[in-house]
Image (cartoon, rainbow, N blue to C red):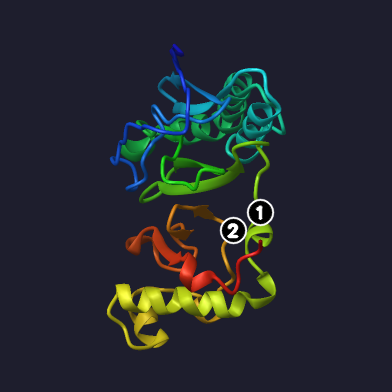
Amino acid sequence: MKKYILLSAIIAIASCTGSKKDNSQDNNSRADSTMCTQLVIDSMELVRKDKLMEISCQLQFMTGNSTAADSINASISQHILEQGRNSNVRESMHMYLKQTYEKYKPEITEMQAQGGEYFADMVFSFEHQGWFLDDNPDSIITYAATSYVYTGGAHGYHSIRYLNFSRSTGHLFTLDQVLDLSRQKDIIQLIVQDLMQQFECNSIQQLEDQGFIGIREMILTDNFYIGKHGITFVFNPYDIACYALGKQSVTLTYEQLKTYLKS
């Protein structure tokens, strides 16, 4: 029997000062009481659980009648829930649960029907959490979304995605609007140098020996967030390193990036 759990909480926001930090997720502060002009954070948790699947979404989003809120919410629906540019995140969450269940039900049903000790009790899992960070310049607000997916095999897959918005308009910034990508090879070199320092390596070969992959052909990731002191580039498992090494993050300061930043 399917089971739904619904939780909604309004978080009022009044000014751009004062915050409550929660560093429990990826060392990124959640904007649980972040104060942003004319923007109000809402949240909802939605869960569907039965003998076939466990699907959960716990997302923050914007509420209120403003163009900025609608634009931010539409991007969350599109890039996190893959539901197109729907500014109603609640509706998108319900559609995501419904579509995910219908998509994977035949597969998991067939696997369970094969029987055996392994398949009989297998349950697919899809978990998503999203929140606004509290570590941005005043004009920027960043959204972080984690996901965990398990559809069989030795282990599931964890990932995180970042979206960076203008607080005033809700515009979603792309990397080429922030950095001069005609010089991305120089930026990549800074990232590789940082990784070598993190892992105490003196060469790319030593990084590869530790489990990094594709370093020599690295493409600048569009998974980044704009912080108060610099831009952090985030690589999920398998992006540039084996699964065992996990997520890799490199923060380049604005001083390091000053010749590459767009005004």
Task: Please state the horizontal and vertical placement of residue 59, each as a whole percent of the image.
Answer: 48, 28
Label 2: state its secondary structure: loop
Query: Which residue, given by chain and number where applicable, does mark 2 sit on?
Result: 222
Label 1: state its secondary structure: loop
Q: What type is the residue that disc 1 sits on? A: Thr
Task: Please state the horizontal and vertical placement of residue 177, each as a whole percent of the image.
Answer: 68, 58
Task: Please state the horizontal and vertical placement of residue 158, each as a whole percent of the image.
Answer: 41, 48
* Residue 220 visible in the displayed image: yes
Query: Which residue, given by chain and number where applicable, does mark 1 sit on?
Result: 174
Task: Quadrant for the N terminus, please.
Answer: top left
Task: Quadrant for the C terminus, please.
Answer: bottom right
Q: Tell me which residue sits at (44%, 32%) in the image.
A: 112
Q: Residues within 10 Å of mark 2 (few under 14, many from 20)?
A: some
| Frontmost residue, 204 versus 34 | 34
In the displayed structure image, the side of residue 97 where residue 152 appears, left or right = left
Q: What type is the residue that disc 2 sits on? A: Asp
| Circle count | 2
* Spatial separation of the CA atoms under disc 2 and disc 1: 7 Å
Q: Tell me which residue sits at (65%, 50%) in the image.
A: 173
Q: Tell me which residue sits at (49%, 65%) in the image.
A: 254
Mark positioned earlier in the residue sequence (2 or 1): 1
| CB within 8 Å, label 2 to label 1 | yes
| Frontmost residue, 235 versus 224 | 224
Image mark for residue 3 = none
Q: Quadrant of residue 39?
A: top right
Residue 113's place in the image compared with 25, above or below, is above
Residue 176's place in the image compared with 70, above or below, is below
* Residue 150 visible in the displayed image: no
